């Protein structure tokens, strides 16, 4: 290409250069039934190893609880999965084909990984329904979705989600008037509108009443199967009700998995007892 051609293209404001194209992940492949692979992941902050040779595998449709003392690296692990933090070494794959370390944060969200932070971030001035409606749109479509009628598939998803999060009778209520627990459920609902394959939830029951905690456990268990869910939580009673007898619990300590298995197994693991007693 001649230099003149290039100059002409640069001058053309509508030309799309390859670097301007949004990143796009390959199609998801879970033929081995594993949705998330973290292998040999390490990351240091100022010489301190927050994550240290971490290995973690999440099955397709699994609900996994992750516990561990403060500073164990739980939030940092989520930062790595979602592309907020780049590890110093190791690999992170979403299914067989998607290398998460090749993607930036928006591309990872687009590929099907949703994250719920501790603090709910709903639009307080909008109704519950409008919050869910907005969450369905990607950035470019926000304007059009507010001004267009939802198609029937979108309406179905919205109704289903309202029932799932227990806010059917609150659809027209301003989100700012909801209780703390209800706001948390609304935010989970907003994530679901993006149809994530993997949902990461960081300490969902902090500040909730016991009744709200029970309802949250029900909600998260009902998501498993259709979605994979990774729940990081400090509250042991909550983890016990979420994990039941059969689900796998991973205990994180100093940036790696200290113990893994049923709640009964990890709770009776002397290394886990020592770490929690020392807290
Ligand atoms: N951006 C950062 N810069 C420096 N240190 C960090 C950063 N993020 C986390 N850490 C440190 O890494 C360790 C793990 O933190 P974190 O992942 O938040 O643990 P957890 O969520 O299990 O409580 C902590 O010692 C924390 O201070
Ligand atoms: Mg944390």
Image: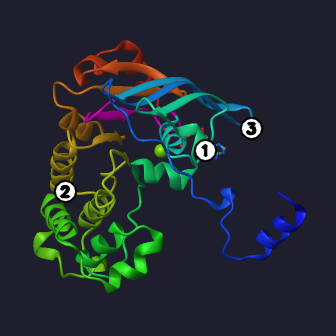
| Res 144 → quadrant | bottom left
Label 1 C-beta lies within 8 Å of the nearest ligand 1 atom: yes
Where disc 2 sits, the SS reads helix
Which of the 4 quarters of the picture holds residue 170?
bottom left
Q: Look at the numbered disc 1 and give the secondary structure of its residue.
A: loop
| Residue named by callout 1 | 85
Q: Which comes before the other along the chain, label 1 or label 2?
A: 1
Q: Position of residue 140 (x, y in %)?
A: 47, 72
267 shown above or below 208: above
Please give the name of the residue rendered at 17% of the width and 66% of the height, measured from the top-left corner.
162
x and y percentages locating residue 267 in the rendered image: 29, 21
Q: Secondary structure at mark 3?
A: loop
Classify 10 Å Cα crowding around label 3: few (below 14), some (14-19), many (20 and above): few
Seen from the viewer's position, the closer of residues 6 and 186 is 6
Query: Which portion, as a residue range, is magenta?
Result: 59-72
- Tell which tag, 1 or 3, sits nearer the viewer: 1
Q: Is residue 110 above or below residue 171?
A: above
Q: CA distance from mark 3 to mark 2?
A: 39 Å
Work out whether 63 lies above or below 39.
below
- Assign the N terminus to one quadrant of the image: bottom right
Residue marked by disc 3: 46
Q: Which mark is residue 212?
A: 2
Tell me: 209 left or right of 118: left
Magenta segment includes 21: no
C-alpha gap between disc 1 and disc 3: 14 Å
**Would you say residue 124 is visible in this rendering?**
no
Q: CA distance from mark 1 to mark 2?
A: 32 Å
Q: Pointers 1 and 2 in contact (CB under 8 A)?
A: no
């Amino acid at each position: 290409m001649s230099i003149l051609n290039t100059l002409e293209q640069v001058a053309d404001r509508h030309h799309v250069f390859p670097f301007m194209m949004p990143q796009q992940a390959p199609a998801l492949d879970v033929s081995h039934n594993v949705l998330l692979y973290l292998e040999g992941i390490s990351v240091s902050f100022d010489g301190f190893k927050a994550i240290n040779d971490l290995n973690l595998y999440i099955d397709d449709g699994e609900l996994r609880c992750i516990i561990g003392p403060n500073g164990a690296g739980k939030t940092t692990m989520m930062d790595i999965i979602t592309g907020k933090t780049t590890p110093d070494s190791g690999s992170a794959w979403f299914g067989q084909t998607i290398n998460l370390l090749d993607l930036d944060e928006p591309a990872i969200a687009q590929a099907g990984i949703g994250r719920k932070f501790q603090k709910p971030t709903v639009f307080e001035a909008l109704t519950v329904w409008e919050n869910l409606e907005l969450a369905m749109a990607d950035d470019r479509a926000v304007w059009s979705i507010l001004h267009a009628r939802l198609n029937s598939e979108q309406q179905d998803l919205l109704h289903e989600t309202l029932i799932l999060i227990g806010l059917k009778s609150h659809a027209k209520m301003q989100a700012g008037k909801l209780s703390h627990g209800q706001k948390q459920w609304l935010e989970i609902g907003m994530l679901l509108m993006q149809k994530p394959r993997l949902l990461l939830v960081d300490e969902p029951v902090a500040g909730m009443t016991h009744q709200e905690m029970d309802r949250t456990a029900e909600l998260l268990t009902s998501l498993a199967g259709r979605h994979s869910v990774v729940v990081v939580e400090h509250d042991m009673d909550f983890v016990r009700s979420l994990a039941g007898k059969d689900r796998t619990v991973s205990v994180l300590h100093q940036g790696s998995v200290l113990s893994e298995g049923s709640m009964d197994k990890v709770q009776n693991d002397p290394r886990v007892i020592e770490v929690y007693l020392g807290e």
